[in-house]
Image: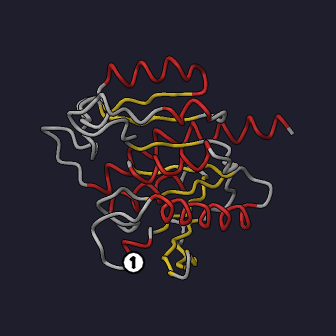
Amino acid sequence: MASPEVRGTLDVGGTKVSTAWIAPRGSVATLVLAHGAGAGMDHPFMAGFGQAIAEAGVSTLRFNFPYVERGKRSPDPERVLRDAWLAAFDAAVSKAGNHPVLAGGKSLGGRIASMCVADGMPADGLVFLGYPLHPPGKPERIRDEHLYRIAVPMLFVQGTKDPFATPALLAKVLRKLGDRATLERVEGGGHSFKVGGTKADDREIGSALAEMAAPFVRRVATARGRAR
């Protein structure tokens, strides 16, 4: 039986943004999830991921960035994106009790989460669903400097044909991150994780990625429990 989804809002600089909570019975951790640049929190990919990882005992908080609430296509300035992330993270912490709270998301959402954590947002781990390491066709414009300032565990779920992260360049970054980073490959997957020749829809793809991410989240939760 699917866990119920509870709708709410957050205030981000005077703009109300939508939220969706899923809190399964016996949850071991909370994962705050931000959407990518081209779709909001209710995209089937995001909804499918949230419901599937709930079945593995992980609560989620999804939220919209302000530009989505305004019906705009271009993302907000970085400062606004960060403010939204910090507000969502604080909301999750207030409900999580003693359970760990991780951060992450699809593409842009995950990248902004990593920037916030590098600058002090106290997430217990990061989950990247298609990390945008560089713009397509421009590997020289790599976005990795802040990643090396992150001390918590990071999971990179990445398609092997993602134009935003060439495998060789991603491998180089992961070597530098060492045991802080874990990689889960989606063979043949692009930035949306679609694989040529398959018919999986976005919700099914999100669900499949949740199955890949859940063991990592549970390991982080277990490690934090041992460290107390």
Looking at the image, which residue sits at the far right? 228
Q: In which quarter of the image is the C terminus?
A: top right
Badge 1 amino acid:
Glu
- Indicate whether 188 appears above or below 26: above
x%, y% of residue 69? 39, 77
Identify the residue shown where x is 24% and y is 33%: 138
Q: Is residue 158 left or right of residue 95?
A: left
Q: Residue at x 29, y 27 (%)?
A: 166
What x and y, as percent, mark residue 160?
A: 28, 29
The residue located at (62%, 49%) in the rendering is: 102
Task: Bin the neighbour count of mark 1 within 10 Å (Cα to Cα): few under 14, some 14-19, many 20 and up.
Answer: few
What is the secondary structure assignment of the residue under circle 1? helix
Residue matched to label 1: 69
Residue 101, can we see it? yes
Image quarter of residue 43: bottom left
Q: In the image, 164: left or right of 174?
A: left
Residue 56 versus residue 177 in the image, above or below: below
Q: Residue furthest left?
A: 197
Tell me if I can see residue 1 in this picture.
no
Which of the two residues, 164 or 157, is positioned nearer the viewer here? 164
- In this picture the colour scheme is secondary structure
Can you give x and y, in whole percent of width and height, for residue 211 in the image? Answer: 46, 43
Q: How many labels does the image show?
A: 1
Which of 120 and 191 lies nearest the eye of the viewer? 120
* Foreground residue among 176 and 189: 176
Q: Where is residue 151 in the image (x, y as percent from the top left)?
A: 66, 33
Q: Residue at x 46, y 28 (%)?
A: 183
From the viewer's perspective, tell me whether residue 66 is left or right of residue 224. left
